[in-house]
Amino acid sequence: MNNRIDSHQHFWKFDPVRDSWIDESMLKIQKDFLPEDLSPLLLENQFSGCVAVQASQSEEETNFLLDLASKNDFIKGVVGWVDLRSENISGRLSHFFQYEKLKGFRHVVQGEPDDFMFGKEFRNGILALKPFDFTYDILIFHHHLPAAIDLVKSFPDQAFVIDHIAKPVIKLGEIASWKKGMEEIAKFENVSCKISGMVTEANWDSWKPADLKPYLDIVFENFSVDKLLFGSDWPVCNVAADYNNIVKTLEDYISKLSIEDQNKIWSENAKSFYKLSD
C-alpha cells in the first residue's frame, strides 16, 4: 500500500514580506517547511511521493520547487507559477518544458477580482498550456465558481483540477450556492477535484469529521472516483490538524469503497492527472 501520492502540499523558507498571507493567526506555520520535514510524515502514512504546489507568485518560486524536486525523488511533480498574462507566455512555457517534473501551473485566483478568469490575457495563457500538456490548478473561493465554470467550458481540451473543493465556508455550514456550482462544474470531463484544504475552511479549533461530511458527500456524488485526488495541503493544514489526522479523516470516510476505488483516490488519479512517473 506504500504507493499513495499526496497531490497537494507546499514547501517554503518563511519570508514575512513575501508570505504576508501567513498572518498572526497562523503562527504555527510562520517557519520553514522543507522536504526533510515532510518525508517522515509521508513514510508514516504509506505515501511514496507528493506533488509540490506553488505558494507564491514568481518564477523564483517555480525554480525553488524544481530545485527541491531534483534533489528529492519523492517529489514526483511540481505545479509552478508563471505569468499567464505575459505576452511571451509561450516562450516561458517552452523554457519550463525542459523540466520533466514540472507538470502544470497555478495562479492564486482567490486573491484576484471576481472577473479575473474572464480576462483576455489570462485566457490566452490558459490556451497556451495545452500544446505543452501542462495542467492547471484552479484555486478559488466558492463565489468564483460561475467564472470557473465558464473557464472550463471554454477550454474543453485543457486538464483542470479544482483545489480545496473550491473553499466552501465550512465553519458557517454554508453549502447551497457552493453545491450548485460544484454540481455544474463536475459535469465537465476535463475537470478533476482535490479533496484538500477542507480543515482550514472549518473551525480550526473545534472541527470534527462530521462537519466535513456534507461537503465530502456532495463532492463524491458529483465527481466520479476517477476524478478525485487526495491532497494534504501540508503545511497549511497544520493550523487546524496534523498530517496523520487529515489522512485518517479521509481513510474513515472512504473505508466503505472498494480497495480499487480507494487506490484511485490515494494514488492512481494523481498519477494519471499529473502524468507522474514512479
Image: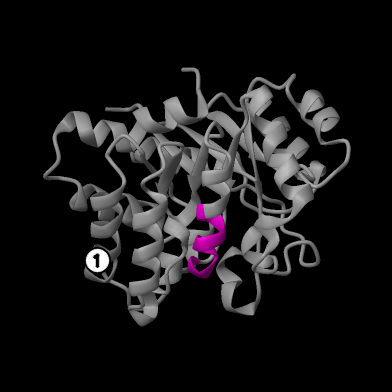
- Against 24, residue 259 (above or below) is above
Give the amino acid at mark 1.
Answer: Pro
Residue 144 belongs to magenta span: yes
Residue pictured at 47% horizontal, 40% vertical: 7
Residue 9 visible, this angle: no
Residue pictured at 76% horizontal, 67% vertical: 16
- Please report the bounds of the magenta region as a residue range: 142-149
In the picture as drawn, the residue positioned furthest to the left comes out as 256
Determine whether, in the image, residue 100 is placed left or right of residue 176: right
User: Which quadrant is home to the N terminus?
Assistant: top left
Determine whether, in the image, residue 239 is placed left or right of residue 128: left
Residue 6 belongs to magenta span: no
The image shows residue 35 at horizontal and vertical percentages of 59, 39
The image shows residue 22 at horizontal and vertical percentages of 65, 68
Residue pictured at 46% horizontal, 56% vertical: 164
Residue 249 visible, this angle: yes
Main SS, magenta residues: helix
Check disc 1 and report its element: helix, strand or loop.
helix
Residue beneath label 1, please?
214
Query: Quadrant of residue 60 in the image?
Result: top right
